[in-house]
Amino acid sequence: MDSPIAAAARALAVGDALGALKNVALRDDPPALALRGIAMAQLGELPRARELLRRAARGFGAREELARARCVVAEAEVALAMRDLRGSAHTLATASATLEARGDRVNALHARLIAVRRLLLLGRLDEAGSALDRLDERALPPSLRAVAELAAAELALRSLRTAPAQAALARARVAAERARVPALLAEVAEASAALDRPAARLVRAGQDHPLRLEEVEALLASGAFVVDACRRGLRAGATWRPLARRPVLFALARTLAEAWPRDADRNALIARAFDTRRPNESHRARLRVEIGRLRALAAPLARVEASARGFALAPRGERSVVVLVPPIDGDQASLLALLADGAAWSTSALALALGASQRTVQRALVEAEAAGSVRSIGRARAQRWLSPPLHGFTTALLLPAPLPVA
């Protein structure tokens, strides 16, 4: 390695992208292209960074497997920052195996961390947790250790385990301080601040109160009968009944819970569940069918009893009934939560993360753009979507992932 390349590599290791470019900006050999690509990524010029890294990988060719694998890993990190989640996990795993076989354990572990972060973005928390458990953190330098602890903290937050999240963030802060990378320190500070922001709202007996994540965790562990509008389901203690794919049943459960301990009027239930203001006999017959389905599903948690004017919830075990709602309500809450990270997302990446069809996401984005809550940049395949950060609360409960069953 010649001295300008070595100097550029040292500058990049401490986050000095401009210092690195001073050494390699005018060179087009593969090592210089790779370093220029990493520098451009640190400066936020992600499309240009990706192009440079691809040129470097082609320049190294098949004979220089180690250098080529490093370029693949760097490009995968750029793709993650661009929220391009279509890349093959197999390609990254192959690069990681090549690096491990050639003795470059640090970059092999880096590749595995990128895979973990991709899984977290997609809401595949169980897979992300298993991959994190398999990491040998003793071999990580301080900067990558900070990234690993941030991933562990995000996994814990999205699984509603605040104590492990706080411990992981404390370790991340120590590692970031040792690494002396300002961007890492800022990321740790932002993640820590999420613990003190409202994460949901508690609705009980007509009263509305903001809750932090640890308060949400305590509520779910309290044994109360919770109609959870963040994850769309019913919960009491360790029992969880998902209703994300049964919107009519969830609408009925929420209306009954908001009326508790009183009953809910039939017309109010019809209006909420079937989106109509003029109920007829057909709606009333359908209501009876759907109430029967809700009774069967919620039987371990609560009874649904008929009254003179409608129906009422009767929770088992003298539990109280509460409704947990997100800080922002509506059908687009999860979409806005994903976009609130400040990155530019493609439609395909949003569809992957939300588990929805691309056409469904496109319709939601058009509606959100008309409402002024999102904006697009670029056209056709280069089109990306952005949203202003959602200040004042954390989006952990809005992100697409099922709550674990305790």
Image (tube, rainbow, N blue to C red):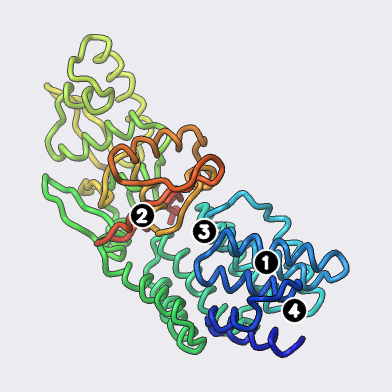
Q: Considering only order in the chain, which callout, 4 or 1, is on the residue closer to the N terminus? A: 1
Q: Residue lying furthest right in this view?
A: 63
How packed is label 3: few (under 14 Cα within 10 Å), some, or many (20 or more)?
Answer: many
Q: Give the SS element for disc 1.
A: helix
The label on residue 397 is 2
Q: Position of residue 281 (x, y in %)?
A: 23, 9
Q: Residue furthest front?
A: 26
Q: Residue at x 69, y 71 (%)?
A: 33
The residue pinned by badge 3 equals 120
Q: Identify the amino acid type marked 1.
A: Val
Q: CA distance from mark 3 to mark 2?
A: 13 Å
Residue in view at x 28 percent, y 50 percent: 326
- 62 left or right of 263 in image: right
Residue at label 4?
104
Could you tell me how many numbered marks the image carries? 4
Residue assigned mark 1: 73
Earlier in the chain: of badge 1 and badge 2, it is 1
Residue at 54 percent across and 43 percent down: it is 348
Secondary structure of the residue carrying numbered label 2: loop
| Disc 4 element | loop
Compute the Cα span from label 4 to label 2: 38 Å
Mark 1 vs 4: CB contact within 8 A: no
- Quarter of the figure with residue 118: bottom right
Q: Is residue 406 above or below residue 300?
A: below
